[in-house]
Image: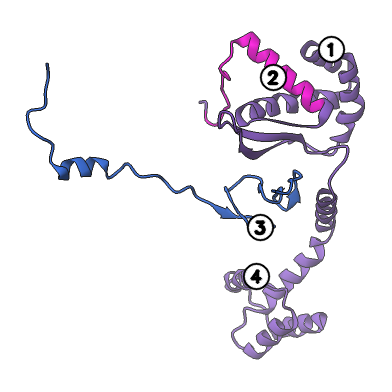
Chain colours: A purple, B blue
Amino acid sequence: MRHRKLNTSLNRTKSHRKAAVKNMMRGILTNERIVTTLKKAKVASKWTDKIITLSKKNNLAAIRKVESILQDKDLIYKLFHEIGPRFADRNGGYTRVLKYKTRRGDGAELAILELTEREVMSIEETERKKKVESKTKEPSVEQIEQTTSSLAEPQPVDVAAKEENEVLSKEITEETAEDAQSNAAEKDSDNSQDSQEETEKK
Amino acid sequence: MANPKKKMSRSRRNSRRAHHFLKVPSLSACANCGAVKLPHRICLDCGFYAGRKIVEVEERV
């Protein structure tokens, strides 16, 4: 089935299309960001991803394969020595297509095609990356809290305690409460646990 | 020559044209500056998309 496969001729013959995609790939590897039409950006994105995957392998076969596509020694050097290593920690998704605006002349939909790891990252991007890194470290603590709260809250007996919990820890959202209710049937836990957890929170 | 047999009534003519209206594009507000923009596109007023600056936007004169 061809579900969601990108098959487009780009209104070009095969050789023309091949050359056009190569030119775009050359553009994005040298400049790290290009502006083209949306369709062209998507096609170029696909092939650039493939070539970066090759560049991460860093063996002679991969180099020759890339040479057969690009035929630009300097660029291939950059690809294998700068761009490839940059994506070492990323599995796929090396390029990003952002819808931009319509072209004045013909109303074509323009898109920005860029590498996800760029040489000069914007301030927002670096901040976001830090956030993601910190998030991946933290959740262990949060998860523990959530599990304890899910143990604590289901008891209908101590409504007062429940209210205290809510006041004490604003972090616990309604979702966790719902989870707790769903878990309630399974648990035959008791007040002792509740009191323990309350103390923990305090 | 083929010709219409009867005059088209105003009702029929207008019914046909009932679909000839312009569609209002679905718009969304920019999360950064609040300007009206097309959804899933970079804001053309501030150059932001998905919480980060993508392009520099020149001041409009």
Q: Which residue is mark 4?
A: A176
Q: Quadrant of residue A121?
A: top right
Is label 1 in contact with label 4 (beta carbons under 8 Å)? no
- For marks 3 and 4, give the one nearer the viewer: 3
Residue at coordinates 11% horizontally, 23% vertically from top-left? Answer: B3
Q: Does mark 4 fall on the same chain as mark 1?
A: yes
Q: Which residues are magenta?
A: A3-29
Along the horizontal axis of the image, is A61 left or right of A150? Answer: right
Residue visible at 26% across and 41% down in the picture: B17
Residue visible at 72% across and 82% down?
Answer: A194
Q: Residue at x 81, y 16 (%)?
A: A66
Mark 1 to mark 4 CA distance (whole Å)? 54 Å
The circle on residue B31 is 3
| First along the sequence among labels 1 and 4 | 1
Residue tagged by mark 1? A64
Instruction: Work out whether residue A53 can be spotted.
Output: no
